[in-house]
Each structure stands twice: as C-alpha cells, then as structure tokens.
Amino acid sequence: MEKIAIIGAGLIGCAWASVFARAGHPVALHDVDAQALASAGGAIETNLAALYEAGLISETPQAVMQRISIDASLEDALRGAVLVQENVRETVAAKKEIFARLDALADPGAILASSTSGIPASSFTEELKGRARCLVGHPINPPSLVPLVELVPAPWTEPAVMERARAIYEGAGQVPIMVQREIQGFIVNRLQGALLAEAFRLVEDGYIDSIDLDKAVKDGLGLRWAFMGPFETIDLNAPGGIRDYCGRYGPLYLDIARQAQPREWSGPLLDTLERERQQEQPAAGRQARQDWRDRRLMKLIAHKRRAAQEE
C-alpha cells in the first residue's frame, strides 16, 4: 500500500490518519507542535478502539497503529508519500506557507490536498511550481465516521491528479465527490447553508421554535437523506418522476425562494436560539452528547453497510 502523509495532528489530522491506516496504508503524521504530536497516538487509538467495538473495522486498534508513524521531521513524513493531506490553521497565510514547503519537499509525483473547509486552492497555490498537483480534499467532520470528501480543483489542477486522488480516497473507503470548478464554500457547506438560512428565518419570524425545527429534519427529511439525495427523493415522490414533481411543485418552491431574503444571524435571534439550546442541551453535557452522536453515527454506518450487502 502507498504511503500517505498527514500534516497537522489536530482533530481532523488524527481522523485522517485513522482513515488511511485502517485501509492498509502506511501513514506518517507530522505537526510542528510537539505536544500535539505527543497526544496524537492516544487520540487515534481511542478512535480506532471505538470503531473496532462497533464492528466497523476488523483489525485490532494495535494492528492498525503499527502502520502509523509520528514524525517530528516534515521531510521524513513526506518522503515517499503519494498523497499529502494538509490540516493546518484555516487562514490563507498559513496555507500559503505550508504549501510552499510541501511543494518544495514532497516527491514530485505526490498529490497535495488541503482539508480546508472553505478556502479555495487557487488562493494559496497559484505561485507554486507544482500547482497542477494541488487541490482541496475537504472532509465532513468527523472524517473517520462520515465518508464523504469533496475534491475541488484549482483552475490549474490537472484532471489526471483529480482522478488519482479520487482513486486513493475511494480505495481508503471514503466517498469522494468531484466538484467541477471552484466555488465559495464548496458543495456541502452551500447545501447546509441553504437549509440553515431558512431554519433561522422560520425561527426568527415566529413560525416554529428551534427544538421542533430540529425534529422536522431528524424525524422527517433526514430519514430519507440518510440513504438518498434530494434529486432521487423528488424523483421518487411523483408518479412521473422528477419532471412530474417539478411541474407539480416548482411554482411553490419558486415563490418560497423569492421570499427568502438574506439575513444576518445576530442579536435577539441568537439569544433565543442559545436559550433554547441550553434548555435542551446544557453546555456541561455537550461532550457527552458529542460522544452519543458519534456512537449513533457508527450504528448508522454499520446499518448502511449491512443494507448494501443485502441489496
């Protein structure tokens, strides 16, 4: 299996290390912060133990950990890697600095991918000699559980690099989607942003409170969206398929879209939301709830795997 280099040993970097190592890749993990490196191994092993207990990996955590090296030297981490997954601070300056070093030190054929959640690759790779091998590989948090990864090229990224990246992520058990060209926020953030914008409006205008709004998604739309996307959903929701659905409901959605004026999320609305969330989930229990979320995700992933095998 080909070597993967993970640059940045925070939450996302450790999750990526878990993803590639459990798929059989040798993984080199590097961070300039010695303390982050020192704690990374324990964090990764804890994650692997949870996956093993849930039946999502067959190897023991100890066996997977043998494929992960913790490297204080960037040069050592990069040597021989076919894919470099960067996870440093979310600023253009930080991305420019690390990508300049990666381009200078990584093997000429290595793919350089950033986990950035919103910064386009063109803003930090334009001046690089090897800019054609650079792209965004944006995971959905936590990537050790949620398999989707958005592959977003810069205007100069070679198509062959995108295809090679797709093959590597797929081989590691992830689900890459190919974004055709750069767009602010990429795809998933824009979809989530559209839903959030309407959710905030409905609460602010007094149509519903945030607790029931969450129910509308988790006990309504979200049940279908766990195994099919919006286009397949509407294709199945009308006798004649997607064109029939659009003919029936297109005017309604057009009217709704015309009513949706952009608004800032601030002031009394945030006071209301914070109060309702605190009543529903006190801050002291947030970590426990996050752990509960991850356990539920594991069970959902296990169910989807079993269902796919039965189909």
Image (spheres, rainbow, N blue to C red):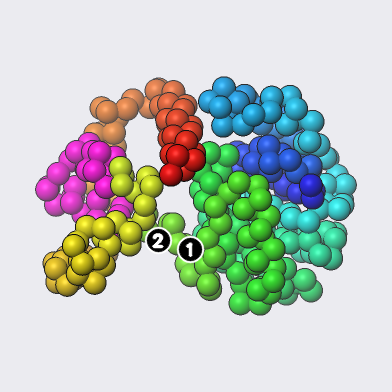
* Residue depicted at 62% across the width and 39% down the height: 15
In front here: 287 or 158?
A: 158
Image x and y of residue 159, in percent: 65, 73
Give the residue furthest to the bottom.
Answer: 156
Q: Is residue 146 magenta?
A: no
* Residue depicted at 28% across the width and 62% down the height: 235
Asked if 195 appears above or below 218 in the picture, the reply is below
Q: For the C terminus, which image quadrant? A: top left
Within 10 angstroms of label 2, few (less than 14), some, or many (20 or more) residues? Answer: few
Residue bounds of the magenta highlight = 194-221
Q: Which mark is residue 186?
A: 1
Image x and y of residue 158, in percent: 68, 74
In front here: 187 or 90?
A: 187
Q: Determine which residue is flagged by label 2.
A: 190
Q: Give residue 248's quadrant in the image.
A: bottom left
Image x and y of residue 58, in percent: 64, 29
